[in-house]
């Protein structure tokens, strides 16, 4: 809210507000946090503001230890935008004992994503949680230079030759997945459905035929148990003596054993013509000549699964929900296929899916409005880091937080930012095309050029040394699924409007109900 009435907090309620329980008095009847009241109340009490002028201002919070966790948890984008209006682009808030310094805007993105390895670290921010899911000695549990080599292996395995084989596999999986859906029409829950579909497509293309075949049985349970160890709570409490944590650890061990047995069988039977990532990793060698041990391969495979699964599932769900609200776009997408591919019956291939640029822009626009990972963290490991633009020092132990989820809806960078408008990506009047980007897009940290400047306001795949290497596969998979589905179905929203975001999972998912109504096409 722009203007806030402070009277509720000036008299009797003032006392309530001093009480921890009054937290709930600013949660309105729909359970939504009124962050405006929160911060205005802070202003009223004059308790917010920097203690050390060299350090960023600190967002007021009533509750020791928990800090602003509740407001952040309910609607982080709104919370951060409210803080941005009050404090500017740089501020620190507290959350469950952690101090998080947020750096907004294109310069904030650049500062966080380009931070040097000896100044701030992603491993320090994430490894407490990820090492239990991916296993040891991989990703953030490996020395940084080894992790960069591991990223190089994965990227090399995601190549055009494999993608050519992946497209027909994905079409096949989509067709098989929906074939028994009720005729002539019905509804499905978007996120749940694409979660189930993507696990099939990603397993088939990346994890290997053995894992795909095991999806109906024990592999699904292992996935599930690992997933239960990859929830926001695990970021806060990485190891508790609870059954879910025990099952996570067992699943991680069993998954490593399963991969090891698959690798041994492939080697023994000379089964080496697979177009999956597993095969590529089996053929990789570290720079010092060491072959990649089975347990590293297993860890990387699990990391890839978690890097790509929920992100792709939610992006596919949001894309279809946005399209279901826009029959004009669906018509245009079918027209695009007819014009570029000849008909809606032409087989989809890696080369012709590349031609579908409107479809690509629809997915891109979805990633702008609904980035699955809207913020990224690093932990300061040097005594301090200085954000030159404002002169702020950020001390050791603080988390640095870049938030593409805020820059991607900032009117400074996007015209009419809350509108789902795939055409903005070809409209040169949109301010995003006039941004002065940095010249760091060509930097190669060891896994090829990053391909985008960290100063871009549009970073759904991150930037710099931790940039995503699954982007091309991600786009290809989502485009192939949507291109196939609009051939099979007419779709519309079941409810009124595109659902609101739910921020309580590891990725931003559509709030339930998020149903799509489909009708089979002739
Ligand atoms: C990194 C998003 C698909 C593998 C990242 C990061 C983001 C991201 C934001 C940067 C994290 C950070 O800086 O802290 C997405 C989205 C996807 C997607 C939105 C789909 C729509 C995939 C897929 C794979 C994958 C399909 C694997 C095939 C990875 C890996 C990293 C990464 C290995 C590197 C992490 C690091 O260096 O710290 N992704 N991703 N992602 N992603 Fe993705």
Image (cartoon, rainbow, N blue to C red):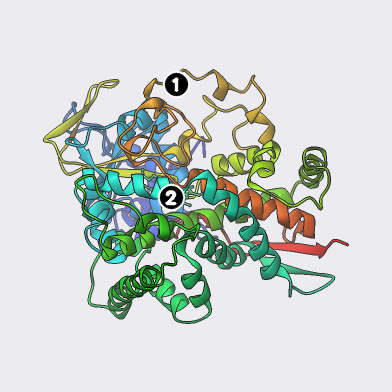
Which of the two residues, 119 or 262, is positioned nearer the viewer here?
Answer: 262
Residue lying at 57% horizontally and 28% vertically, measured from the top left:
414
In the rendered view, would you say 468 is above or below 248? above
Residue lying at 37% horizontally and 62% vertically, measured from the top left:
302
Which of the two residues, 56 or 181, is positioned nearer the viewer here?
Answer: 181
In the rendered view, would you say 137 is above or below 289? below
Q: Position of residue 87 (x, y in %)?
A: 35, 31
Which of the two residues, 276 or 9, is positioned nearer the viewer here?
Answer: 276
In terms of sequence position, does the residue under pointer 1 or pointer 2 come before the other? 2
Q: Is residue 516 visible?
A: yes
Residue lying at 73% horizontally and 75% vertically, measured from the top left:
180
Closer mark to the observer between disc 1 and disc 2: 2
Within the image, what quadrant is residue 122 found in? Answer: top left
Q: Position of residue 368 (x, y in %)?
A: 55, 39
Mark 2 highlights which residue? 157
The local secondary structure at tag 2 comes to: helix
Q: Position of residue 307 (x, y in %)?
A: 42, 54
The local secondary structure at tag 1 comes to: loop
Q: Position of residue 60 (x, y in %)?
A: 29, 43
**Can you tell me whether the CB of the residue at mark 2 lies under 8 Å from the nearest atom of ligand 1?**
no
Using the numbered discs, state the Cα–Cα distance from disc 1 to disc 2 in whole angstroms.
30 Å
Most distant residue in the right direction: 522
Within the image, what quadrant is residue 316 found in? Answer: bottom right
Q: Which mark is residue 172?
A: none
Mark 1 highlights which residue? 437
**Can you tell me whether the CB of the residue at mark 1 lies under 8 Å from the nearest atom of ligand 1?**
no
Which of the two residues, 521 or 214, is positioned nearer the viewer here?
Answer: 214
Q: Count neighbours of disc 1 (C-alpha within 10 A) and say few if under 14, some if 14 to 19, many if 20 or more.
A: some
Within the image, what quadrant is residue 171 found in? Answer: bottom right
Q: In the rendered view, does 486 fall on the left or right side of 365?
A: right
């Amino acid at each position: 809210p722009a203007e806030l009435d402070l009277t509720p907090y000036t008299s009797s309620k003032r006392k309530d507000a001093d009480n921890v329980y009054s937290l709930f008095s600013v949660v309105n009847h729909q359970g939504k946090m009124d962050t405006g009241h929160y911060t205005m109340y802070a202003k009223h009490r004059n308790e917010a503001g920097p203690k050390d002028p060299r350090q960023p201002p600190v967002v007021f919070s009533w509750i020791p230890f928990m800090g602003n966790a509740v407001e952040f948890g309910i609607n982080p984008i709104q919370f951060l935008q409210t803080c941005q209006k009050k404090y500017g682009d740089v501020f620190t808030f507290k959350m469950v004992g952690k101090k998080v310094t947020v750096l907004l805007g294109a310069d904030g993105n650049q500062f966080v994503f380009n931070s040097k390895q000896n100044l701030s670290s992603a491993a320090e921010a994430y490894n407490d949680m990820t090492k239990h899911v991916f296993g040891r000695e991989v990703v953030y549990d490996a020395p940084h230079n080894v992790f960069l080599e591991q990223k190089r292996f994965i990227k090399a395995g995601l190549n055009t030759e494999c993608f050519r084989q992946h497209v027909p596999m994905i079409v096949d999986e989509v067709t098989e997945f929906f074939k028994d859906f009720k005729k002539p029409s019905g509804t499905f829950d978007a996120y749940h459905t694409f979660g189930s579909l993507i696990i099939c497509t990603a397993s088939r293309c990346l994890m290997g035929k053995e894992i795909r075949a095991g999806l109906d049985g024990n592999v699904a349970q292992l996935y599930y148990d690992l997933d239960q160890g990859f929830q926001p709570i695990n970021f806060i409490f990485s190891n508790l003596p609870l059954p879910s944590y025990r099952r996570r650890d067992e699943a991680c061990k069993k998954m490593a054993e399963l991969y090891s047995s698959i690798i041994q069988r492939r080697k023994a039977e000379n089964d080496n013509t697979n177009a999956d990532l597993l095969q590529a990793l089996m053929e990789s060698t570290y720079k010092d000549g060491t072959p990649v041990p089975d347990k590293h391969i297993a860890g990387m495979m699990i990391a890839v699964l978690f890097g790509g699964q929920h992100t792709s599932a939610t992006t596919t769900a949001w894309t279809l929900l946005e399209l279901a609200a826009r029959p004009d776009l669906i018509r245009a997408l079918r027209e695009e296929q007819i014009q570029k591919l000849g008909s809606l019956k032409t087989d989809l291939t890696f080369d012709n899916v590349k031609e579908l640029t409107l479809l690509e822009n629809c997915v891109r626009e979805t990633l702008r409005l609904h980035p699955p990972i809207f913020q990224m963290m690093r932990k300061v490991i040097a005594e301090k880091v200085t954000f030159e633009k404002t002169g702020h020092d950020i001390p050791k132990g603080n988390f640095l937080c870049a938030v593409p989820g805020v820059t991607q809806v900032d009117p400074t960078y996007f015209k009419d930012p809350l509108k789902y408008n795939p055409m903005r990506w070809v409209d040169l009047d949109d301010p995003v095309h006039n941004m002065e980007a940095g010249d760091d897009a060509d930097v190669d940290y060891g896994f090829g050029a990053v391909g985008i400047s960290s100063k871009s306001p549009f970073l759904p795949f991150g930037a710099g040394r931790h940039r995503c290497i699954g982007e091309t596969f991600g786009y290809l998979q989502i485009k192939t699924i949507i291109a196939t589905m609009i051939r099979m179905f007419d779709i519309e929203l079941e409810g009124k409007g595109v659902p609101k975001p739910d921020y309580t999972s590891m990725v931003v998912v559509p709030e339930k109900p998020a149903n799509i109504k489909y009708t089979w096409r002739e």
